Amino acid sequence: MVSFTFGTKLYYFMSDKKWLVLYSKPRWEKKVDAALIRKGIESWCPLNKIEKQWTDRKKIIEEPLFKSYVFVKISAEERTEVLITPGVLNFVYHIGKPAIIRDEEIKNIKDYLLIDNATIDIVPTSAFKENTKVRVRQGVFQDAEGTILRGGKKKVYVQIESLGQVMIVEFKSDYLISI
């Protein structure tokens, strides 16, 4: 625990490192990630492999999975150093506090992105109206709970609540059970 005084008040901060979400300038995610890593700060910009079509060829490129978001694992003392990094606009806030992402959520996304032909789409939570709860029976997301929508016989929608977004992951229907 770290303490400091500001005026007449004494403040305490836990020095535990937590995963926080940064909001970056558009199309600066990879640059911000590289700059933070050069500073010695644990940073991660999840990349999704996408096939792009040009007039003369197709090419697989890596695009940020979450547009304008970069994840950092930092302590309270490192926040200022992160904020002064070129391209960083602010932390993402949830209910008035910086959004904290659980280690398990980061691990699940990392593990899933390592699977060959993994496909992930990101959709804002506001896009969903009706919910049917399911649990994943096997695979990287085993025991994760999600929501199936629009006749989703092949897809489960896993909500990452602290981001206010939904990660859409394709599964075979026999991987799922209703709860």
Image (spheres, helix red, strand yellow):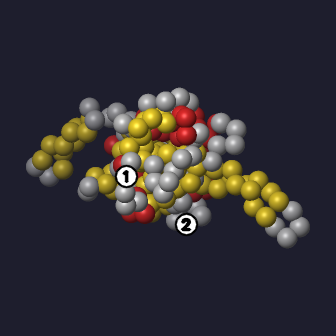
Is residue 80 found left or right of 24 in the rendered image? left
Q: Nearer the viewer, residue 144 or 29?
A: 144
Q: Of the residues tagged 2 and 1, which is closer to the observer?
A: 1
The mark found on residue 26 in the picture is: 2
Quadrant, the C terminus: top left
Under circle 2, the secondary element is loop
**Which mark sits nearer the N-terminus, 2 or 1?**
2
Q: Residues within 10 Å of mark 2 (few under 14, many from 20)?
A: few
Q: Which of 2 and 161 is in front in this view?
A: 161
In the image, residue 145 lies at what x, y percent?
A: 41, 38
Q: Which of 96 and 66 is in front in this view?
A: 66
Quadrant, the N terminus: top left
* Residue on which disc 1 sits: 131
In the image, residue 105 lies at what x, y percent?
A: 45, 38
Viewer can see residue 19? no
Residue at image position (60%, 54%) is: 64
Q: Residues within 10 Å of mark 1 (few under 14, many from 20)?
A: few
Amino acid on which disc 2 is placed: Pro
